[in-house]
Image (cartoon, rainbow, N blue to C red):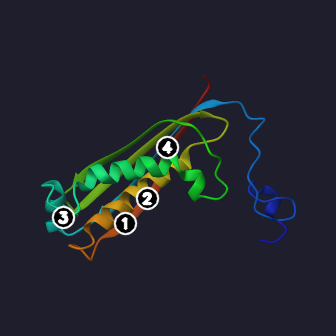
Amino acid sequence: MVGSHSALTHLSPEGHASMVDVSAKPPLLRRAVAVGVVILRPATLDLIQRNRIAKGNVLATARLAGILAAKNTATLIPLCHPIPLTHCSVDFEFLPRGNRIRITASAQVVAATGVEMEALTAVSVAALTIYDMCKAVDKTMRLTGIRLVSKQKLRI
């Protein structure tokens, strides 16, 4: 789509990647929620629930990995602004039908730019951590459905 990049905010007038200037935007309370799913074998799901995976507590490790990833999103995604997160949570829900773990991450900040990438990064890295910790016992795992489900901005 050469010539149509003027509407894309991460491209300079010359078509080069650039960080968006948000210095004129007011700081707002911004929240975002993202979800993703890990599909596993029933036996793997059972091992996680009973804390029997050899590498340790899978969900506690995945939670910490997701939060740490959210805090470091700007170092992972080249054009993301470094933002001072005020809150991040990563939660898990066992969905026995379909042998799934649903991951939900929320992130919050008071800033001039959004926090969507932080929530998505938290879900992604939490899912990758589950995969890493369980790959020795389950070669069939799949990560799927990673998406943003909500975002808000509120005047403070």
What's the CA distance linking mark 4 and mark 2? Answer: 16 Å
Q: Tell me, yes or no, whether the two marked residues, 4 and 1, touch with CB atoms within 8 Å.
A: no
Callout 1: SS:
strand
Residue 36 placed where, x, y %? 39, 57
Q: Which residue is mark 1?
A: 143
What's the CA distance linking mark 4 and mark 1? Answer: 20 Å
Picture disc at residue 81 = none
Counting residues from the start of the chain, the first of labels 4 and 1 encountered is 1
Counting residues from the start of the chain, the first of labels 4 and 2 encountered is 2
Counting residues from the start of the chain, the first of labels 2 and 1 encountered is 2
Callout 2: SS:
helix
What residue is drawn where x is 23% and y is 62%? 55
Closest to the observer: 151 or 18?
18
What's the CA distance linking mark 3 and mark 1? Answer: 21 Å
Q: Count neighbours of disc 4 (C-alpha within 10 A) and say few if under 14, some if 14 to 19, many if 20 or more.
A: few
Q: Is residue 146 above or below residue 106?
A: below
Closest to the observer: 122 or 61?
61
Residue 58 placed where, x, y %? 25, 56
What's the CA distance linking mark 3 and mark 4? Answer: 35 Å
Q: Which residue is mark 3?
A: 54
Closest to the observer: 89 or 76?
76
User: Residue type at mark 2?
Assistant: Ser
Q: Tell me, yes or no, whether the two marked residues, 2 and 3, touch with CB atoms within 8 Å.
A: no
Q: Is residue 110 above or below residue 77?
A: above
Q: Which residue is mark 4?
A: 150
Q: Is residue 23 above or below residue 74?
A: above
Q: Count neighbours of disc 1 (C-alpha within 10 A) and say few if under 14, some if 14 to 19, many if 20 or more.
A: some
Q: Which residue is mark 2?
A: 124
**Circle count:** 4
Q: Tell me, yes or no, whether the two marked residues, 2 and 1, touch with CB atoms within 8 Å.
A: yes
Callout 3: SS:
loop
Q: Is residue 95 visible?
A: yes
